[in-house]
Image: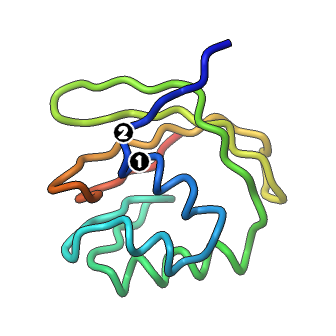
Amino acid sequence: MTALILPEPIAAYFVADQQSPEAVVRCFTPQAVVKDEGRSHVGLDAIRSWKLEAASRYTYTSEPFAWVQQDGRQRVTSRVTGNFPGSPVDLQYDFRLERGLIASLEITL
């Protein structure tokens, strides 16, 4: 099986996601938008709060296994395993990149 080679900003996000909310925030543009669990988080402070809340509720790992580019978006499918209902689950991470950072991220089933 070949290793999945992701664009640098996306690879950095998945590494940061296992480190800390501050590491995650550094992956985004100042006006970035994250959509997750039916809510939108706009700007770095909101993204930091989103990651802090998720980290306080769940312990999980995320293993990306597929990546496609389409219409200016990059979609990564990742197996997420942890202490949350329905684990494990394959989630879709739709990224839009801008100047080497993440401008938007939408996470869906």
User: Which residue is tagged 2?
Assistant: 7
In this rendering, the count of numbered labels is 2
- Which numbered tag is attached to residue 53? none
The residue at 36%/63% (across/down) is 34
Residue 20 lies, in percent from the top left, at 60, 76
Q: Residues within 10 Å of mark 1 (few under 14, many from 20)?
A: many
Position above or below: 53 against 60: below
**Quarter of the figure that contains the N terminus:** top right
Q: Viewed as shown, does residue 33 lie left or right of 18? A: left
Q: Residue at x 77, y 46 (%)?
A: 81
Residue positioned most to the top: 1
- Reply above or below: 56 against 82: below
Residue 27 lies, with reference to residue 45, above or below; the image says above
**Residue 96: image location, x then y, percent:** 24, 47
The picture places residue 16, in percent across and down from the top left corner, at: 55, 64
The amino acid type found where label 2 is placed reads: Pro
Callout 2: 10 Å neighbours few (<14), some, many (20+)?
few
Which secondary structure, mark 2? loop
Give the quarter of the figure containing the C terminus. top right
> Of residues 6 and 95, which is closer to you in this image?
6
Residue type, mark 1 in image? Ile
Residue position marked by numbered label 1 in the rendering:
10
Q: 89 or 51, which lies in front?
A: 51
Which picture quadrant has residue 35? Answer: bottom left
Residue at horizontal 34 percent and vertical 67 percent from the top = 40
**Tag 1's secondary structure?**
helix
Mark 2 in CB contact with mark 1 (< 8 angstroms)? yes
Q: Residue at x 38, y 33 (%)?
A: 75
Separation of residues labelled 2 and 1 (CA atoms): 6 Å
